[in-house]
Amino acid sequence: MSSKTETLQATPPTSTINKLENKQEFNWRQCWYAVIFVQDLPANRPYSFFLYDEPFVLFKDQNGQLICLTDRCPHRAARLSDGQIIDGKIECLYHGWQFGNNGQCLHIPQLPTDAKIPANACVSSFKVLERQGIIWMWAGEAQTAIDELIPSLSDWEKPECFNLDYVRDLPYDQSYFIENIIDPAHVPISHDGVIGIRKDAQPLEIEAIDSNIQGIKGRWRRKNTANQPWITLDFIAPNLIVYRFVDEQQGRFGGTALYSIPLSKNRCRILIRNYSNSYSQKIKLMPPWLEHILIRNKVLEGDLQLVVEQKAQIERLGQNLKDVYLPLKTSDTLVVEYRKWLDKFGSSLPFYQGYTSSKNIGNSECDQKLITLDRFSQHTLICHSCNQAYQLTNRLKQSCIGVAIAFAAVAILADDSRIKIAAISVSVAAVAISAMAQRFKTFFERSYTRH
């Protein structure tokens, strides 16, 4: 069996690369951020998100064009995302001001009909594009956007390719997610019994092939098993990790793309896409919500609490990671390389934790333990498939309760014994179905905990 890895299709023009390298500082506004999978975007209401604590709102106008604006009304600073979409315009819920696709205010109910809308009654707008089923946002001025910088997955375009998508909010910043993802050594232990096996924990041959302002290329393989192929990965700054594989002899290909968006110092949103041409028919026919319940949620929740506590410990110590970590060359090479990348190129980021430096990192005032394991708010509410299944289950439960009450009343009032028995039977069956629905609801609400 032969194995090789492709490189990402999208690469910036040479002049752009040289300009960035010369500056030796990563400009976080001059790049694209994966905001949401297309299927998870609400159809008829605004979608809110943050980028480094800045609020944004996403919606579609009457022509289906994607619009992204600052999520703050210029009138009294209310959130536009709390409002509604009317004829392709977003209306502030507070006083009814309406804004169009360029952020200009188009209607103020409190102004006389002959009065002119103030020129500064507007909000900033940002360029958004849809690529490969993902909505991307350019964080800088729209005229500076370089569409070619959106990273693409060439295999995803092939008709035989099938993908599994998953979205999740995590209660820690983006850098800890990326560190976790480029650390293959933790998988056999942290995810034992889910996607790992404890007995597979062993020394790794692991190395960073290249590191520059665009990101890091690395690879690893197990040392205790002979003839192991290299597993390669790319970190594409600032928000993407890509694993790829190609088996030419068997005609198989696939990979995992892990996008992340830094919502705040204590929260990031991740978009995970697994894709391959070798998924079984069983997996292809499985509804996304079932795959999320059986696999995805367990994987993300397997070490979620560990990373939260890791971050809290580091912030309590108030020291550089170089003084806290005890890295091994047989497991932690890429973790250290990523933190050093932040040291070298991340000085313009609003916050970061490098290996020997940091910026705007401190203890959070919120109680992390209250928000750590919350599958419902972190996933179900923002996943189209799981939210639909949850709402359907909830309606089924409520309907069965109503049926049970109604037939219980019939049983009480009926004089005919046969009618009583039938009504009681239906009422008991409805109660049983309601109980099963309630139990099923917990799969969308309660997180997986390791034992």
Image: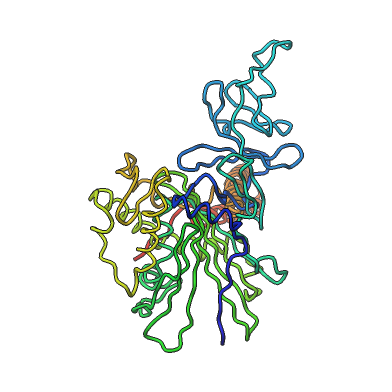
- Which quadrant does the N terminus fall into? bottom right
Residue appearing at x 66%, y 27% in the figure: 104
Q: Is residue 331 above or below residue 447?
A: below
Q: Quadrant of residue 178?
A: bottom left
Q: Does 339 appear above or below 366?
A: below
Residue closest to the eye, 442 or 126: 126
Say left or right for 213 vs 201.
right
Work out whether residue 319 can be spotted. yes
Frontmost residue, 14 versus 212: 14
Report the residue at 28% width, 49% height from top: 315
Residue displayed at 66% across by 13% down? 111
As drawn, is 186 to the left or to the right of 75? left
The C terminus is located in which quarter? bottom left
Give percent across and percent down for residue 239: 50, 55
Tell me residue 243's x, y (percent): 52, 69
Residue 195: x %, y % from top left:
46, 71
